[in-house]
Image: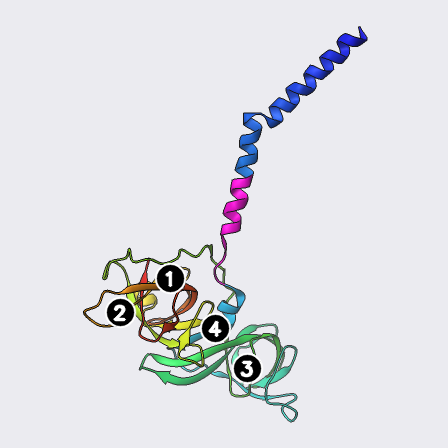
Amino acid sequence: MKRSFLVLAGVSVLVVLSLFFGPAGLSAQENQVQKAKIFAEEYPLISDSDMYCSILIWDQKIPEIKIIGSEREDERAMMVDSDTFYINKGKEDGLDVGQMFLALQIENPIAKLGYLAQKKGKVRIIRLEDHVGVVKIEKSCGDIQVGNYLIPFEEKETVIGKDLGYNNNLKPGESLTGQVIYLDTDFNIAATGHWALINVGAEQGLKVGQQMTIFRQKKPNYPREAIGNLVVIDTQKKTATVRVLSCREAVEKGDIVQVK
């Protein structure tokens, strides 16, 4: 009787193991592995730095809210996280304590498209008087200075995906095409991870998250060659900010970009 019980128990264990490790069990495990592989291949294509610290073409009216001074201006010109500064607007101008803004440095005009601008980080109003306010830096990008402007802060969502790479499959004119008009480097060339500006934007239907192949055509009668891939991280009316995802040659001003 005892021996029969042990045999029956052994058979039961084998049945359970076969159910777990048999074809159905292996299939479930393979599905989990496959999902893990897919997850590993995909990642946030647009980072917080891309969204809140990058360059852009400012094509709107110059913002009204401006930094006019700082608490520690006698010690240093540059402001960093947790520093406080003063702005030229207050509660009588419609501002509220707790409001979040994005600091913006506006520089020289570019090709009649607008002004070159740099996002400088997130700031928050902590105190208001009638026509002046006190603002604290929550998260800066480099430095914030007197003379910078503030625009309303908008929370943005990243884009999950993967670098689609680059090849010569796209035909000229097959999809939206533009050119690189500015590179955010000191060497007039850009590589993987660098920001650049292109001369197509929201009015042409370009959207954040779209990837574009970078082409170079050395002479008008030469074929163009794919040299890299980029992702759109911000759009303005007629321009966009992009980040190079991958490239086999340094990206230069004048290179062609085309939506995949």
Please name the residue that numbered disc 3 is placed on. 92
Q: Position of residue 90 (x, y in %)?
A: 56, 82
- The nearer-to-camera label among 2 and 3 is 2
Q: Is residue 138 magenta?
A: no
Q: Main secondary structure of the magenta part?
A: helix
Kind of residue at badge 1: Lys
The answer to the question of whether label 4 and label 1 lie on touching residues, with beta carbons closer than 8 A, is no
User: Alpha carbon of mark 1 to alpha carbon of mark 3: how far?
Assistant: 37 Å
Number of marks: 4
Crowd class of label 4 (few under 14; some 14 to 19; many from 20; radius 10 Å): many
The answer to the question of whether label 3 and label 4 lie on touching residues, with beta carbons closer than 8 A, is no
Magenta residues, start to end? 33-46
Kind of residue at badge 4: Ser
Crowd class of label 3 (few under 14; some 14 to 19; many from 20; radius 10 Å): few
Please name the residue that numbered disc 2 is placed on. 217
Please tell me which residue lies in front, 122 or 229.
229
Label located before the other in sequence (2 or 3): 3
Residue at 78% across, 9% down: 3
Secondary-structure class at tag 2: loop
Residue 22 position (above or below residue 99): above
Label located before the other in sequence (3 or 4): 4
Q: Quadrant of the C terminus?
A: bottom left
Label located before the other in sequence (2 or 4): 4
